Image (cartoon, grey):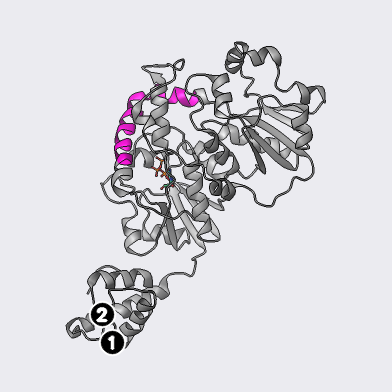
């Protein structure tokens, strides 16, 4: 009697194929096999083989299989995806987006700081910050805290989902096992395409290169082959289309907020939320890489323009994004987009560190204040940035725990290299 329990036909077929069985007499099996043949399974033949000795076992097996099939709740429309979601990036958002497409209701599990520490190493963002990012994502319907790193059958039942979704990489838990092994064997696992060229590991790697010892050595751009030679994120038009809010037209009071939105964090999301609450339709301007680098220097931005655009588009308060928006909010921009209000958080691109850089620039001479036009027209408003988190705080966390992050980076980047060279195959993006 096989000791693996199959919960759906697909998995059972796979088992039969792998076992290389040829079917002749058993009618239940014949029925299954005719279905298999109809899905063009070349290894299955419908007649002419002796399998009498295993027939009884198979009969039991089919009964077992049928009763188990009935036990599984009819909740196919509820999909579960879990993760650390540390330093949210476009790969995470794309995974969540694809998982949502597999059903109607998406339940997202978040591992606790302790669980991440135990299985992977120290996270950069804490529980509360990671949670806030997930809650703000437009494809998320329900959020579950303290999700186990290795989800079990019981856990998946407890969140009332039939399937768990995960990217096509292999997540290894602290016992050296595939974290999704059990659910895979039960046929409750759905693979989605892992987004190439972006990961928490690569972001942390860049931040480690930007910092030396106990201080941020951010004046010189890094040129490290190991980072440069990694696969790059592919900004296809389909991705941008899938992330965007299709068929939504601007309506009512239109609010505009702009910035770099680099190392996307909860501070950004809260400002977006406030900006949206001041009108009916929120347009976000995302500056291009050259502009961000011109004002911020060093290796900024950490995430490229398209990654930053997708991050912003994944947030439920955002209606539209201007890709590579101009630094200066001109009267023409206001007219073109019919903007009624321009909003900035108190922590913004006018931050003294940024201004310092701007002072050295020609643009600064030409136009000292990028918001001169909306201010003159009386349509500029600052909103308090309640969370005092900024890009430099994230960098400070890396500095404060440099050794721990370095160790984790070393382990994870090896795993990542292995994924790209040995494991990765083509998976269709949903
Ligand atoms: N994911 C993805 N594409 C990426 C990165 C992550 O599709 N570029 C998916 C993972 O496969 C998983 C989910 O996002 O289904 C959550 O991943 P998480 O647990 O946060 O971590 P990792 O898979 O290790 O990815 P990262 O190093 O970027 O955090």
Q: Nearer the viewer, residue 81 or 47?
A: 47
Q: Residue at the location (55% across, 61% down)?
A: 104
Q: Residue at the location (37% across, 35% down)?
A: 230
Q: Secondary structure at mark 1?
A: loop
Q: Quadrant of residue 255?
A: top right
Labels 2 & 1 near each other (Cβ < 8 A): yes
Give percent across and percent down for residue 1. Answer: 22, 74
Disc 2 residue lies near ligand 1 with CB under 8 A: no
Q: Is residue 414 magenta?
A: yes
Residue 367 visible here = yes
Q: Quadrant of residue 199?
A: top left
Between label 2 and label 1, give the one nearer the viewer. 1
Q: Secondary structure at mark 2?
A: helix
Residue topped by disc 2: 58
Q: Is disc 2 surrounded by few (<14), some (14 to 19) or many (20+) residues within 10 Å?
A: some
Disc 1 residue lies near ligand 1 with CB under 8 A: no
Give percent across and percent down for residue 383. Answer: 69, 28
Which residue extends farthest right? 377
Query: How far separated are the C-alphas under marks 2 and 1?
Result: 9 Å
Question: Magenta region: which residues?
Answer: 393-417
N-terminal of the pair, mark 2 or mark 1, is 1
Residue 242 is left or right of residue 219, and the answer is right
Q: Residue at the location (32% across, 59% down)?
A: 182
Residue 26 is marked as 1
Q: Is residue 118 magenta?
A: no
Q: Nearer the viewer, residue 102 or 237?
A: 237
Residue 2 visible here = no
As drawn, 285 above or below 180: above
The secondary structure making up most of the magenta span is helix
């Amino acid at each position: 009697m096989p000791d693996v329990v199959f919960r759906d036909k697909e998995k059972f077929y796979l088992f039969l194929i792998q076992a290389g069985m040829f079917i002749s007499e058993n009618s239940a099996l014949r029925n299954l096999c005719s279905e298999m043949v109809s899905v063009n399974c070349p290894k299955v033949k419908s007649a002419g083989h002796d399998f009498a000795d295993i027939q009884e076992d198979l009969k039991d097996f089919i009964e077992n299989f049928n009763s188990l099939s009935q036990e599984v709740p009819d909740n196919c429309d509820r999909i579960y995806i879990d993760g650390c979601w540390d330093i949210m990036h476009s790969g995470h958002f794309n995974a969540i987006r694809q998982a949502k497409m597999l059903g109607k209701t998406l339940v997202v599990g978040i591992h606790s700081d302790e669980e991440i520490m135990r299985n992977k190493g120290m996270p950069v963002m804490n529980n509360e910050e990671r949670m806030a990012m997930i809650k703000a994502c437009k494809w998320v319907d329900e959020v579950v805290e303290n999700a186990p790193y290795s989800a079990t059958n019981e856990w998946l039942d407890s969140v009332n989902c039939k399937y768990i979704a995960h990217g096509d990489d292999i997540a290894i838990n602290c016992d050296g096992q595939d974290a999704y092994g059990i659910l895979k064997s039960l046929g409750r696992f759905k693979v989605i395409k892992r987004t190439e060229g972006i990961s928490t590991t690569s972001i942390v790697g860049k931040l480690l290169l930007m910092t030396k010892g106990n201080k941020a050595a951010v004046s010189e751009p890094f040129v490290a082959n190991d980072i440069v030679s990694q696969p790059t994120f592919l900004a296809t038009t389909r991705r941008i289309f899938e992330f965007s809010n299709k068929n939504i037209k601007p309506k009512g009071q239109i609010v505009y907020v702009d910035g770099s939105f680099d190392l996307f964090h909860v501070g950004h999301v809260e400002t977006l939320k406030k900006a949206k609450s001041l009108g009916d339709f929120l347009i976000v301007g995302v500056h291009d890489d050259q502009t961000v680098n011109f004002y911020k220097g060093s290796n900024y931005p950490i995430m490229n323009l398209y990654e930053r655009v997708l991050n912003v588009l994944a947030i439920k308060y955002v209606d539209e994004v201007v890709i590579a928006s101009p630094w200066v909010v001109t009267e023409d921009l206001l007219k073109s987009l019919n903007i009624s209000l321009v909003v900035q958080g108190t922590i913004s691109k006018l931050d003294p560190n940024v201004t310092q850089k701007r002072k050295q620039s020609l643009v600064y001479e030409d136009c000292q204040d990028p918001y001169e036009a909306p201010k003159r027209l009386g349509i500029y408003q600052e909103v308090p940035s309640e969370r005092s988190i900024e890009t430099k705080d994230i960098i400070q966390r890396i500095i404060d725990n440099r050794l721990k992050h370095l160790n984790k980076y070393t382990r994870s980047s090896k795993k990542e290299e292995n994924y790209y060279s040995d494991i990765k195959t083509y998976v269709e993006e949903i």
